[in-house]
Each structure stands twice: as structure tokens, then as C-alpha cells.
Amino acid sequence: MAAPRSTTATVLALGTAQTVAWASSYYLPAVLATPMARDLSTSPVEIFAAFSAALVVSAVIGPWGGAVIDRRGGRGVLIGSNLIFAAGLACLALAQGTVLLWTGWLAMGLGMGIGLYEAAFAALACIYGREARSPITGITLIAGFASTIGWPLSALMEAQIGWRGACLGWAGLHLFLALPLNCLLPSGHIAISAPAAAVKTGQDGDRAEARKSRWVMVLLALVFAITWFNSTAMAAHLPRLLEAAGATTAVAVAAGALIGPAQVAARLAEFTLMRQLHPLISARLATLTHPLGAGVLLALGAPGAYAFAFLHGAGNGVLTIAKGTLPLALFGPAGYGLTQGLIGGPGRALQAAAPLLFGLALDRWGVQAIWLTSGLALVAFLMLLGVRLPKGEVHP
């Protein structure tokens, strides 16, 4: 199958494939956990426990997947993820007890480790090098609608053909839509010069520079772990949090619906108005929007629900892009896939615990639990202040 010749075609193909990948994995339990648990005579808690285990698997496998992409390019890895996703979904559809249930979710974790944003970003870095910032933004603009598309489609399939049929339906979309689209990706990757790779790994003898790079990687891993924790905590508990602030259920749901459009609007702004800024500056600004929204919510109560949801969504939208563009700008394309895997691993692991931990905080402190996520966001901001902007750079 011929590869698309234009960047736009590559972005459209990969963005659509990513939409299927996210909708059929990360966003699947929200709709199917209850009917799945009812049919298997278990509880939704076990379904989410299996999903959390899948996130841990994705964190462990991510660095390996990134290293393979560095060596061979991303097309084969992403195609492999579609096959693994389809197998995991088929396993879930066939489950009659906990063995196949857990087997299916663990397989899904493997697919998530090599088939979501980190792998897609690494594939684009292999193709476009330092020019990958715009393509990375482009695929997040498209896949940002994964929940908007995925939740209603999962619900529709569950209503028409049951949750098992829904799993098989998503498996079919992987095989007959996402996989062919990933086949369209360019197979080659840019050549990395020896000096660039030497600086990346510290082989040029500059041990101090190598230690500095490792320290920056640690900081970024912590920053994006906080980002994933806050994002997942809000995804799981936002309506409850807003109701604790005095909002009605209708207002809480309406405010929550703003998060998706806010993410897309912020990504459009990053693609246009903020594209001349270095990704480090964009990331610093984005870490402040959640605490700012929390301040509005605490000060105004229910009337501040919409402002909080919009500001949280906007910051989350930019930080999703920054997870791909910031390591690329700071470290370059050499070894980028492995870097993405190492930086993203802690976030995936912490993400698995976010719904439980923030739920406990919400039970204990009510709306004041927002201090937890706001405090973490401010810590992330301070960490990013510890990362120096490359001298003389405004944009990569």
C-alpha cells in the first residue's frame, strides 16, 4: 500500500487510527464496565482493577516499544498494536470468567504501551525529526475527539448487540480501519547524525551534560506523571467534584462537557498563536490553568464550575501536546522513542491509582480535595521552572 505523500495525509491517517485506539481502550470501561461486570457475575470494581493493571503493563512496555520505533520506524509497531488490540478485545468478548477477562485487559495494556500517543509521537519524530511539532499537534486535534466519538459509539453498539458485540465491533475497526491507515504511514525515518546521538547519550565525554540531561528527563517524567494523575482524576470524578462545590447534576454534566471543546480550542491556539513559543513556555503556562480554575471554583462555588472545567480542559489539551513536543525540543530526535517511553512510564503507573486516590480525597474533604490536584500542578510548574530554556531559543 502506498504511503501518503503529504504531511496532511499522514496526520489524518495517524490521527484517525489514534482515535480508534483511544476510544477502544482508555475510554472503553466507562461505558462497558457495568454490563461486562453484570454478565460475568462480578463487580465493576474488578473491571476497573483489570483496566488499572493494563495501564501498569503499558507503562512497563512503553520504553521497549519506543526503542523499537527508534531503530525501525513506527509503522510496524503501530500495525502490531492494532493486531494486539483486536486480539485483546476478542478475548474480552469471549470471556466467561475472570481468566479471559484479565487476559484480555493485559493484552490491551500491551497494545496501549505500543499503540497510543507515545508511540505515535515517536513515529512522527522518526519521520519528521525536529519538524514533528505540527504533526504531533495535528494528531492530538483529531484524536482529541476520541471520547466524543467513542463513548456514544460504544453505548450504541452495547445497546444493539451487547457488550461482547461492542468489543468485537471495536476489534473490527482496528483490523479494517486503523490498521490500513497505519499501513499508509511512511516506513522510513530520518538519519540521525553521530554527533547528535553522542550528545544524546553522553558518549562525547561530557559527563556533566549527560547528568544534566538525565535530571531534566526525571523532571519531565514527574511533570507528566502529575499531568496524567490530574487528568485521570478529573475524568473519573469531575461531576462529583462540581456537585461538592454546590453545582446541580445538570450543571456538573454541562460543565464537564466543556472539557473536550476546551482541549481542542487550546490545541488550535497552540497550533496557531503559540507555535512560535518554545514548548517549555507553553507547558509552563498550561500547568497553571488547573490551579487558576480551582481558585475560581473555590471562590465562586457553583457559578465557577464552567470556568474550572474550561481552564482544566485547556491546560490538559496543551500538556498532551507538550508531552510530545517538549522532549523533542530539548533532546532532539535521536533516541526519541525510548525517551518518550521512559518519560511516560511513571505517568501511566500513577494514572492507574488516580481514580482511587482522588476519590478517597473527595470522600474525606469534599470540594477542598481540589487542593490536592492544584498543589500537584503547582509543583509541576516549579519543576518546569527548573528546566532551562535553550539559550537564544523562542521556538524549536
Image (cartoon, rainbow, N blue to C red):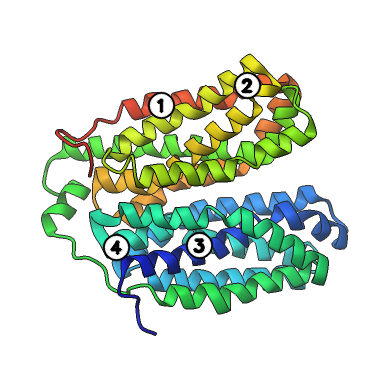
How far apart are labels 1 and 4 at the CA level?
Answer: 29 Å
3 and 4 marks in contact (CB < 8 Å): no
Q: What is the three-letter code of the residue carrying label 3?
A: Gln
Report the residue marked by disc 2.
297
Q: What is the three-letter code of the residue carrying label 1?
A: Phe
Which is closer to the viewer, label 3 or label 4?
3
The quarter of the picture where the N terminus appears is bottom left
Packing grade of label 4 (10 A; few <14, some 14-19, many >=20) is: many
Q: Which residue is drawn at 65% across and 70% down?
A: 170
Q: Which of marks 1 and 4 is nearer the N terminus?
A: 4
Task: Estimate the x, y position of residue 115 in percent, counting from the top left.
Answer: 49, 63
Q: Earlier in the sequence, mark 2 or mark 4?
A: 4
Q: Find numbered disc 4 in the image and state the secondary structure of the residue it sits on.
A: helix
**Does any portion of residue 359 appear in the rendered image?**
yes
Packing grade of label 3 (10 A; few <14, some 14-19, many >=20) is: many
Residue 18 circle label: 3
Which is closer to the viewer, label 2 or label 1?
2
Q: Earlier in the sequence, mark 2 or mark 3?
A: 3
Q: What is the three-letter code of the residue carrying label 2?
A: Leu
Report the residue marked by disc 1.
381
- Is 136 situated left or right of 59 in this image? left
Task: Estimate the x, y position of residue 380 in percent, counting from the top left.
Answer: 43, 29
Packing grade of label 1 (10 A; few <14, some 14-19, many >=20) is: some
Residue 126 circle label: 4
Q: Earlier in the sequence, mark 3 or mark 4?
A: 3
The quarter of the picture where the C terminus appears is top left
